[in-house]
Image (cartoon, grey):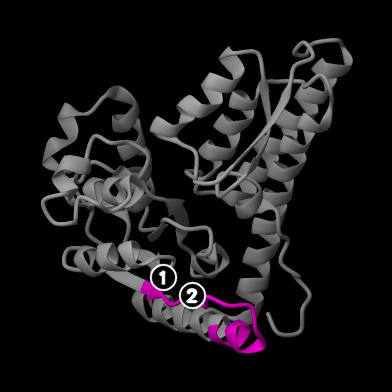
Amino acid sequence: MQLVQELPEIFESFAEQRKKSFLMVKEWKDQGKPIVGSYCTYFPKEIAMAAGAASVSLCSTSDETIAEAEKDLPKNLCPLIKSSYGFAKTDKCPFFYFSDVVVGESTCDGKKKMYELMSEFKDVFFLRLPHEQTEAAVQLYRNEIIRLKDYLSEKFQVEITDEMVREATRVNNRANQALKDFYGLMKYDPTPISGYDVFKVLYGSTFKFDRAALAEEVIALKQKTEEEYKAGKHFEKRPRILITGCPIGGATEKVIRAVEENGGVVVGYENCTGEKAIGIQVDENAEDI
């Protein structure tokens, strides 16, 4: 019988929004459902979904925990890594606190060091990513995904079949397509909504546990936005800006606000907040999934 996990001691000191996040994820845990946390879009969330777990993105978008992280990590590491580790170490990220396992990845040496230290107080599965585009690299990544499947199967005591992976892929594809269709509305000129409104939907989707329900919500939101656009409700014509580079969220949201407060509109996110995360559909009918 799974024990109910308690809230951290510092819970009462949090702002109301973070309390709500803690209570939301705790409710999921109290139902006996596992949670897999991750930091990177290279994480194949379909495997976690097939195991009956929720897949959730972890906190790394504020400088409030960097000072604590620098007690363990070199100060010259990038703020993204120090923020990630600091939130984990201080129990200030509700999603990390309740994650049964964190899936790390070898995207850079700084992150590898972070996961090494993180594994001292949290179960961490380290995904070894290939750093070249060859057939051998594809096989390496495939082997890593199988290794992750076997790990989650053993950890959560569940058999993960090919059909379970296919079903999870279908659900996640539909959610990703709904999100892509939604931000595709920004092809209209003038735009129906602000780029900041688009961002809030994309970023908020990473904290939604039920991917099937997420798809329905976003489809309904797209339809409503299109109807209002046809009725004449939209932004005035503005210079159109694409944001690329590092992930957007928390402190870096100021980039979006700076663009739009000065007369532009952000029409696309070519980074882990947008196209990189949801732009590719997995072949649901491939013989070897």
The residues colored magenta run 126-140
- Which quadrant of the rendered structure holds the C terminus? bottom right
User: Callout 1 environment at 10 Å: few (<14), some (14 to 19), or many (20+)?
Assistant: some
Residue 191 location in percent, x, y?
A: 77, 22
Quick one: label 2 or label 1, which is nearer the N terminus?
1
Pick the residue in front: 249 or 132.
132
Q: Quadrant of residue 137?
A: bottom right
Which residue is pictured at 35% across the width and 36% down the height? 21
Q: CA distance from mark 2 to mark 1?
A: 6 Å
Label number found at residue 106: 1
Q: Amino acid at mark 1?
A: Ser
Residue 134 location in percent, x, y?
A: 65, 84
Residue 23 location in percent, x, y?
A: 32, 37
In the figure, 157 relative to 268: above or below?
below
- The residue to which callout 2 is attached is 129
Q: Is residue 21 magenta?
A: no
